[in-house]
Image: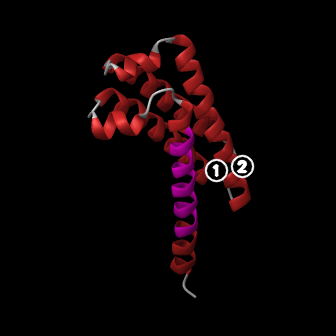
């Protein structure tokens, strides 16, 4: 079988696992926050909720990309994926600690609060991706 077929199979496996991780992250994130992201984003068109949620997902995806790049097996990827997941949860908790009224601010569509969460999440994703090593 040609090498590119193995490459496609590897791509498909990592991509599917990444989608599953991202879906799981979204489920946990919306349960972790006191506000209802989907109601705020879909029904109320709240830009702050979209920025905060989107930034958190981007930060997690960056960390997953680091895990894919630095691992040689599915098990190793899964372990680093869990580490990336935990890092994002901790980053969100730290962002809330630094901004005690964060959830209320996002509900009120305060863009500054949303940018804060997005920046913390993306920073945590970049740093965790850089810290992962084979």
User: Circle 2 — which element?
Assistant: helix
Which quarter of the picture shows residue 115?
top left
- Give, as a single range, the part of the protein colored magenta: 12-28
Q: Residue at x 46, y 17 (%)?
A: 102
> At 29% across and 30% down in the image, what residue appears?
46
In the drawing, what numbered circle is on residue 70?
1
Q: Is residue 18 magenta?
A: yes
Q: Which mark is residue 122?
A: none
Q: Quadrant of residue 55?
A: top left
Residue at 58% x, 77% y is 6
Q: First in sequence, mark 1 or 2: give its number.
A: 1
Residue 45 shown in magenta: no
Q: Residues within 10 Å of mark 2 (few under 14, many from 20)?
A: few
Circle number at residue 79: 2
Left or right of 52 in this view: 70: right
Closer to the camera in the image, 117 or 47: 47
Residue 73 visible in image:
no
Dominant SS in magenta: helix
């Amino acid at each position: 079988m040609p090498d590119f077929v193995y490459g496609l199979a590897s791509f498909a496996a990592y991509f599917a696992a990444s989608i599953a991780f991202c879906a799981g992250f979204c489920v946990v994130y919306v349960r972790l926050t006191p506000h209802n992201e989907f109601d705020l984003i879909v029904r109320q068109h709240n830009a702050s909720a979209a920025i905060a949620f989107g930034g958190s997902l981007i930060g997690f995806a960056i960390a997953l990309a680091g895990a894919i790049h630095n691992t040689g097996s599915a098990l190793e990827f899964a372990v680093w994926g869990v580490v990336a997941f935990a890092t994002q949860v901790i980053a969100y908790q730290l962002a809330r600690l630094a901004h005690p009224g964060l959830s209320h601010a996002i509900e009120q569509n305060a863009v500054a609060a949303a940018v804060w969460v997005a920046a913390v999440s993306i920073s945590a994703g970049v740093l965790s991706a850089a810290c992962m090593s084979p």
